[in-house]
Amino acid sequence: MDQETFNLSIRKFLKTVGVGSQREIEQAVQKALEAKRLNGDESFAATVTLEIPSLGLKVPFEGEIKLK
């Protein structure tokens, strides 16, 4: 195994996940605000599950997203 290649590929994957997830969340919040389904001061529980079936890995991560 090439450790540098491995680390770089993990970082690239996590960057893609982070940027894509942020964009999706921002768009969903914007649509909900425009539709008046949100006031703009809510907090949301959020869960992301990291899954790599070939490694038997399935790990949930939980957090909170606050609008104010």
Image (cartoon, rainbow, N blue to C red):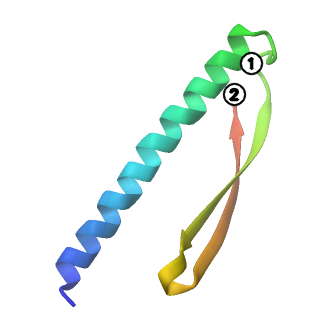
Residue 67 is labelled as 2
Q: Position of residue 46 (x, y in %)?
A: 71, 48
Q: Are marks 1 and 2 in contact (CB under 8 Å)?
A: yes
Depth check, front residue: 35 or 66: 35
CA separation in Å, label 1 and label 2: 6 Å
Q: Position of residue 53 (x, y in %)?
A: 54, 78
Element marked by disc 2: loop
Residue drawn 51% across and 38% down?
22
Depth check, front residue: 39 or 1: 1
Horizontal side of residue 24 vs 7, given as left or right? right
Residue 42 sits in quarter = top right
Looking at the image, how many numbered discs can be counted on the residues? 2
* Mark 2 crowdedness (10 Å alpha carbons): few <14, some 14-19, many ≥20: few
Q: Position of residue 32 (x, y in %)?
A: 72, 18
Residue 12 is labelled as none
* Mark 1 crowdedness (10 Å alpha carbons): few <14, some 14-19, many ≥20: some
Depth check, front residue: 59 or 68: 59
In the image, residue 4 sits, relative to residue 22, either above or below, namely below
Residue drawn 38% across and 50% down?
16
Q: Which quadrant does the C terminus fall into?
A: top right
In the image, residue 1 sits, relative to residue 46, either above or below, namely below
In the image, residue 19 sits, relative to residue 29, either above or below, namely below
In the image, residue 30 sits, relative to residue 34, either above or below, namely below
- Of the two numbered discs 1 and 2 on the same chain, state the one appearing first in sequence: 1
Q: Which quadrant does the N terminus fall into?
A: bottom left
Element marked by disc 1: loop
Identity, as a three-letter code, of the amino acid under mark 1: Gly
Residue 40 is labelled as 1
Residue drawn 32% across and 63% down?
11
Horizontal side of residue 61 vs 22, given as left or right? right
Identity, as a three-letter code, of the amino acid under mark 2: Leu
